[in-house]
Amino acid sequence: MYTLVSASVLALDLSRHSAGAVVADVVDRALTLPAILDVPAAPAGPPLSGVVDLERAAARTRLLEAADRAPRLDQALRAVSQSLGTRAGAVAAQVLQTALVGRLADLVQLLEHELGDVRGLPRELVDAVVDRAVAAWVEDDDTAHLPDVTRLSAPWAALVGELPPSPPAHGAVPQLLSLLEAVARTDRARWSALDAAHAAVHSGLSWSELMHAASRAAFEHGRTVPVARWQLSAVRASSAAGHVTAPWAPGAAMSIVGAVQALALLDVVPASVSEPLLAPCRRVLLLPA
């Protein structure tokens, strides 16, 4: 469900996840680990192997099960359609606001594939990343066992600590930084205006088709990692502005994701792709043309 090529899907999910900014930070830093730590490639090997890791494996399983209890987007949509015209409709709509397309298990699969299978990082490091991502995902969940969260976070703290990730070097960097600053300063009125601007610019599947073209360009030009990192930065900017607790405005989040994708690939995608993706943010956030 989650891939680096379609990092926009992960960004849209994390933008309305209560711990999305923390998860985004973990994934962003994980994508820079080979450069930061200068670690040699090693066979990935089996996850969490050895007696010493049995408690961590059990903790990860419990937290994955806790996360899996959250409704998926398809389940929330079904609940809304079944409750229209009833008192349960408002409750179902609230569930829809926080329901995600993907699952925590999908993020685990992405990290294990990208860090272990593709980059061949040491199994110890891959497990530390995965465990911290799992802990971050559920740390605001009242049903998660706090000692499990603490146990899974400890290896990450020991191996990675507070090493900050370097900013991506690819893309229209000054414009991307201006966009992220504007997003972080966006109030609820502009958030709603951005949602409306998205609806005015895009109809039907136009936005999805443009994003597909931009995602293909990211893959063809070897930029999936920097584009994904810019998308994760947008999650943090949205969280800083408090939009994760605002009324659900999917068009606003889609506008930001689209603008980030366009600016990160501005030199390799045609204007017929970048301009429509940038239009809502330019209109509402007053980004320069």
Image (spheres, rainbow, N blue to C red):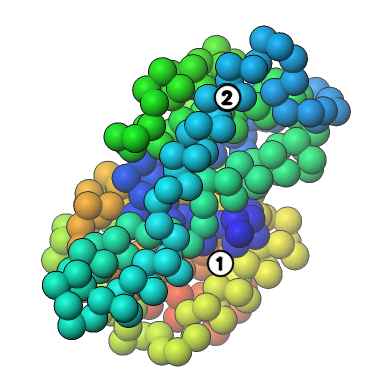
If the image is split into quadrants, where does the C terminus sit? bottom left
Crowding near the residue tagged with mark 2, few <14, some 14–19, many ≥20 C-alpha atoms within 10 Å: few
Q: Nearer the viewer, residue 268 or 121?
A: 121
Residue at the image point whose x is 44% and y is 39% from the top: 66
Q: Nearer the viewer, residue 101 or 52?
A: 52
- Image check: 195 left or right of 154? left
- Identify residue for label 1: 266
Crowding near the residue tagged with mark 1, few <14, some 14–19, many ≥20 C-alpha atoms within 10 Å: some
Give the label on residue 182, or none. Answer: none
Residue at the image point whose x is 32% and y is 65% from the top: 96
- Image check: 232 left or right of 280? right
Question: x and y percent of residue 280 in the render?
Answer: 33, 75
Q: Is residue 233 visible?
A: no
The amino acid on which the numbered mark 1 sits, given as a three-letter code, is Leu
Q: Identify whether 126 is placed above or below 94.
A: above
Q: Of marks 2 and 1, which one's residue comes earlier in the chain? A: 2
Report the residue that reaches farthest toward the bottom: 204
The amino acid on which the numbered mark 2 sits, given as a three-letter code, is Ala
Q: Identify whether 215 is placed above or below 118.
A: below
Question: x and y percent of residue 192 in the render?
Answer: 20, 70
Q: In the structure shown, which secondary structural element does the residue marked by tag 1 occupy?
A: loop
Q: Nearer the viewer, residue 191 or 275?
A: 191
Give the label on residue 58, or none. Answer: 2
Residue at the image point whose x is 62% and y is 76% from the top: 213
